[in-house]
Image: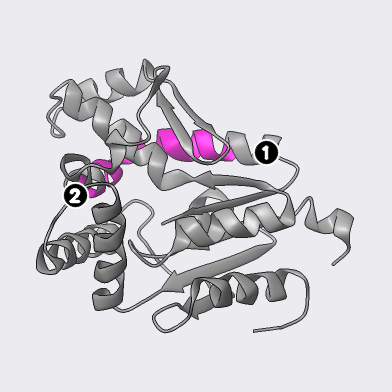
Amino acid sequence: MSLNSISHVKIAIDGPAGAGKSTVAREVARRLGIKYLDTGAMYRAVTLKLLREQVPLSDREKVEEVLKRTSLDVENGQRVFLDGEDVTAEIRQPHVNAHVSPVSALPEVRRRMVQLQQDIASRAPGIIMEGRDIASKVMPDADFRFYLDASLEERARRRQKEQRERGLHLSLEEVAAEIKERDRIDSGRDDSPLTIVPGAFVIDTTTRTFDQVVEAILNVVRGNRKE
């Protein structure tokens, strides 16, 4: 693939919580010089909005009404703004973690987020987007589709490390239980469940270093490896 082609490449990365999607995608985007979008952050921001307004998830009309008056902006793939407020740190708090999967499972929420994500993708010359339904729903025509996975134990260890760096101190068992429940909801929902699409490059990150995963993706994109 030529340098010009790479600058216009569209890459989809899916996978469960804690598989390393965000950090890997951000670095791949940096090396290729393309836009990065963390779609999970968008769902977290909506979750925070619904929690703040104490909207019952069973009240679908109210959820719709809140979505219509909610503005989201993701700057440089990292800073997340909800109605103009920087909520980058708050959306990673335990109370958001505990509710993001049920919120993400709502068809109304998914439809709105997919629409926003597709709009962003259509405006970007090149983009790498990661989440749960990028290859299956958001960018089914992506040039490259990857699925990152890892053992539950390793994903819990990574997530616990991230949380401790933010001043959160949950036990490994608590983090593993949280991730296991998210896996159940994400894989079992009716609308855009977490799945491996045909033709996706599956990378098990359990025993690979961060740099090894990044290089594996870059090798595929640059045409140095077929699988």
Query: Residue 84 appears in which quarter of the rendering?
Result: top left
Looking at the picture, tell me which residue is in the foreground, 164 or 58. 164
> Relative to residue 44, is residue 67 depicted above or below?
above
Mark 2 → mark 1, Cα distance in angstroms: 37 Å
* Circle 2 or circle 1, nearest the eye: 2
Q: Which mark is residue 168?
A: 2
Of the pair 164 and 77, the residue shown nearer to us: 164
Inspect this view and state whether residue 110 appears.
no
Q: Could you tell me which secondary element the residue under label 2 belongs to? A: loop
Which image quarter holds the C terminus? bottom right
Q: Position of residue 177 (x, y in %)?
A: 13, 65
* On screen, residue 224 above or below 143: below
Percent across and percent down for residue 9 are: 74, 55
Q: Residue at x 34, y 23 (%)?
A: 67
Side of 155 where 83 appears, left or right = right
For the point 22% across and 42% down, which residue is it?
93
| Horizontal side, residue 56 vs residue 161: left or right | left
Rendering colour mode: one colour
Q: Which residues are magenta?
A: 101-118
Residue 62 magenta-highlighted: no
Identify the amino acid type marked 1.
Answer: Ser
59 or 144: which is nearer to us? Answer: 144
**Residue 108 quadrant:** top left
x and y percentages locating residue 46 in the rendered image: 32, 32
Query: Alpha-carbon neighbours of circle 2 within 10 Å: few (<14), some, or many (≥20)?
Result: some
Q: Identify residue for label 1.
A: 122
- Would residue 75 be found to the left or right of residue 183 on screen? right
Q: Is residue 8 visible?
A: yes
Above or below, 196 against 52 in this view is: below
Residue at screen point 70% across, 39% down: 124
